[in-house]
Amino acid sequence: MVMPRLPERWSWLVAIPLGILACGQVSEIGTGSGGAASSGGAGSGGAGSIGRGGLGGDAGTSQGASSQGASSQGANGGDGGTGYYGYGGTGVPGYGGVGGTTGGAWGNPSPNEVLGDGWVVSRLRLGDTDTAGNLSNTAWKSIGVDLDGLSSTKDSPDHCQPQGQANPGSVKTDGDGGIDNSFGANILPILLGLDSGLSNNQQAYIDSGRSLVVVTGPVSQDVPALLGSLTGARYGYDGTFDVVAPWFAYDDSYVGGIPRCSLTGSVTAGKLDVTGTGFWELRLQLPMTELVLEVRHTRVVANVSAGSEPTLDGGMLAGLVKTDDFIEAMRQAIGRLDPNLCDGSTFDSIASQIRSASDIRADSTNGDPGQPCDAISIGLGVTLRAVEARKGASNPKDIPGCF
């Protein structure tokens, strides 16, 4: 069998030796049908500034309301149909049809409806740099939380069974204070071998106005019962990052559920600690493709400052990815490069590397050596900035790479 030729930047796929290697909101983000202004109304575009259909007259309330604007498909095309304020226009691919029709497609009563006080991730540490931004191959040890309640070493007997050709010293050994982060310890070095600029690319993705929002409502030094959600979101004006305008939460579902998670917890003595159910998506920006991971059993921790306008510092975002889900996500990512890579010996080698990084059970427990590790823990450092979160952005639509 002749193996397909890989793009030069993906030559690592055949070079790696075998053996290395959402969450749901308390009140749903929108219900209803998004109005019935018959595909947004009159014209097609935006009569407002830069072809945005004059802000589309709150298009989401009645499929565009301003009748798909009036300046011939938003004048500059791509700005229309994003639906952030119901702008008219042709629409950003995957974010609605022509102009205001996205309002009806979302099924929201009003895309401008306030969801709550929240915090947007303005910076994300994957685990290859310390807090000062210096490169470090041990930075992962201080990023994340203790998910399984154990502090494991390579010799710990009370640990799930490593898979494949895993090195027990690599998958059993926790970070500082029992932190579980096999992603940082075992997966991230492989991804950095693919692209040493992964962290910079991820930051560029955030700077373009695409990130995660943690909705908590008002916080203070002590909040006995805190409810919220974690979801992907987009800034109100595509292509930029800021906190002066609202961020719009992704809120439509697809097969497998809605990619956001409900959060419950508290703030005690200035320490925010919330736990999530469901899943959210971590979208890693790899060369010429995207690796979309469903993260579950989420924890968000941060320090809440005192004062009338508190800030969050020292943020950590943690959870786990089911091993089989991780492997399928990688299959789709490389399949978008070349469908011939969806199976065969090359992909089998990649899957083996991922499986060998399994360090925890999919229910976030550990301790039984008779049970196989079937999930990969992950920890991320996050810088959080206060924003207003609103309903009304459509999930990115991923083109399947493999079927």
Image: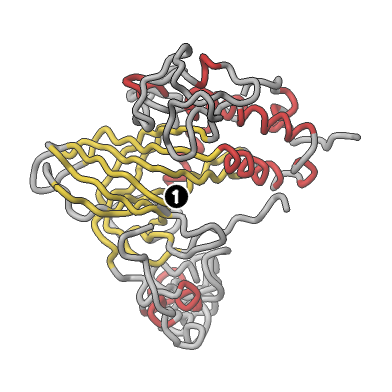
Q: What residue is drawn where x is 28% and y is 37%?
A: 301
Whether residue 264 is visible: yes
Q: What residue is drawn where x is 41% and y is 76%?
A: 60
- Please identify the quarter of the rendering in which residue 326 is found: top right
Q: Residues within 10 Å of mark 1 (few under 14, many from 20)?
A: many
Label 1 sits on residue: 279
Q: What residue is drawn where x is 45% and y is 24%?
A: 128
Query: What SS does tag 1 mark?
Result: strand
* Residue closest to the eye, 250 or 204: 250
Residue 390 to residue 330: above or below: below
Question: Measured from the top left, where is residue 115 in percent x and y?
Answer: 29, 63
Question: Measured from the top left, where is residue 370 in percent x and y?
Answer: 53, 26
Residue 13 to residue 296: above or below: above
Q: Residue furthest front?
A: 370
Three-letter code, disc 1:
Phe
Q: What is the quadrant of the N terminus in the image?
A: top right
**Left or right: where 70 falls relative to 193:** left
Q: How is the image coloured?
A: secondary structure
